[in-house]
Amino acid sequence: MTSVISGEGVTSEVLDMVTEEQLERLGISPLGRRLEALKLLREITGRLYTYKIVNDPIHGHIEIHPLCVKIIDTPQFQRLRFLRQLGGSYFVYPGASHNRFEHSLGVCYLAGELGSTLRKRQPELGISNNDILCVQIAGLCHDLGHGPFSHMFDGKFLPVARPDKKIKHEALSVKMFDHLVESNDLYSVFEKYGVTEQDRTFIKEQIAGPLKHKSKKK
């Protein structure tokens, strides 16, 4: 089967992007066999990368994609260890010590589960491993822009410090994501795992919504 697909110009780097329609054109039938072949291809491509295992306090042992690990290992992401998720509640309830770091790992995992479930239930959407990876990265990085004590920072501090601007942590997360990639020179790492500049835009738009592009002056 691999040789047949290779004849169509599909390499191992994009095996997870093979669609049910392509398999049909290759003469693979019935539909059940094509769906089984797609599942097998995705399992194979999933093993091409070495995932790290993290013992999450809520979800148990979860797999972290190596590109996500590269992001996690940056100073910009590590700072989330020291940001309380529940603001000043920690001073009243000592058990409320949750931080943005562990929260972001959990969101990354659940984002991947969501993407995988959609792909399984709606194969006609053509969701690839790359799509799911982008959703995972968005989940991982969605809180990069939080300041000390999380929402207390953007809800109480920023309006006083910058009353002239309405600043949301989602917009700051996008700026921090760009800074994280540039300052740690992760462009080649993103490229290694097939995440393009367009994919990075997709990631940022999942975090903060459609990006505003400056119109060119005539």
Image (cartoon, helix red, strand yellow):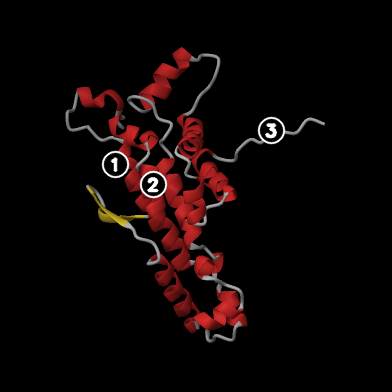
Q: How many marks?
A: 3
Q: Which residue type does callout 3 highlight?
A: Lys
Q: In the shown orientation, is residue 171 left or right of residue 97?
A: right
Instruction: State the quadrant of the C terminus.
Output: top right
Secondary structure of the residue carrying numbered label 1: helix
Residue 172's place in the image compared with 42, above or below, is: above
Q: Earlier in the sequence, mark 1 or mark 2?
A: 2
Q: Position of residue 9 (x, y in %)?
A: 61, 74
- Residue at image position (39%, 49%) is 68
Q: Residue 100 location in percent, x, y?
A: 32, 36
Mark 2 touches mark 3? (CB < 8 Å)? no
Q: Residue at x 21, y 22 (%)?
A: 91
In the rendered view, does 106 fall on the left or right side of 181? left
Mark 1–mark 2 distance (CA, rounded to whole Å):
16 Å
Q: Residue at x 45, y 18 (%)?
A: 158
> Residue at coordinates 39% horizontally, 47% vertically from top-left?
70
Q: Furthest-right residue in view?
A: 218
Picture coordinates of residue 195, whole percent (x, y): 52, 53
Residue 70: give its label: 2
The one of 103 and 43 positioned closer to us in this rendering: 43
C-alpha gap between disc 2 and disc 3? 31 Å
Q: Earlier in the sequence, mark 3 or mark 1?
A: 1
Residue in front for this viewpoint, 217 or 75: 75
* Residue bearing mark 3: 214
Q: Which mark is residue 102?
A: 1
Give the amino acid at mark 1: Glu
Residue type at numbered disc 2: Lys
Label 1 vs label 2, nearer the camera: 2
Q: Mark 2 against mark 3, which lies toward the viewer? A: 2
Whether residues under marks 3 and 1 lie with C-beta atoms below 8 angstroms apart, the answer is no
Graded by Cα atoms within 10 Å as few (under 14), some (14 to 19) or many (20 or more), the crowding at tag 3 reads few
